[in-house]
Amino acid sequence: MIIPYEMIEPETLNSLIEEFVSREGTDNGYDDALAKRVAQVLSRLKSGDMVIVFDQESQTSNILHKDVARRLTEQDV
């Protein structure tokens, strides 16, 4: 299920994005500050390039590229 980022409380959204960019690792060759990476992901959420997906079965959320999320949600139907 895709959850619009606007429906998430700002503090919760920020924590979700921070967890995502930290989980994506620092071994990606980028040394950007956490705040900069969070801002980049938020920008991509606002543009619709990335979306927040909630999996009801595992009760977990993730941030995915919109095309990946679309394929996953189509498989669930």
Image (cartoon, rainbow, N blue to C red):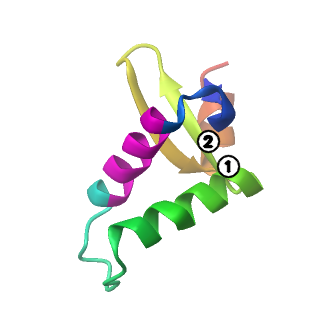
User: Which quadrant: the N terminus?
Assistant: top right
Characterize the magenta stretch by its predominant secondary structure.
helix
> Which residue is the extreme one toward the front?
11
Q: Which residue range is magenta in the image?
A: 11-21
Res 65 → quadrant? bottom right
How far is disc 2 from disc 1 in space, using C-alphas? Answer: 5 Å
What residue is shown at x 65% (from left), y 60% (from top)?
Answer: 44
For badge 2, the amino acid type reads Ala
Mark 1 Cα within 10 Å, few/some/many (few <14, many 20+)?
A: some
What residue is shown at x 58% (from left), y 55% (from top)?
Answer: 42
Asked whether 50 or 10 is in front, the reply is: 10
Residue labelled with disc 1: 66
The disc label shown at residue 69, or none = 2
Element on which disc 2 rests: helix
Query: Residue 7 at what x, y percent from top left?
Result: 64, 26
Q: Are marks 2 and 1 in contact (CB under 8 Å)?
A: yes
- Residue 69 horizontal side relative to residue 33, left or right: right
Query: Residue 67 at what x, y percent from top left?
Result: 68, 51
Element on which disc 1 rests: helix
Check the image and report above or below for 66 versus 56. Answer: below
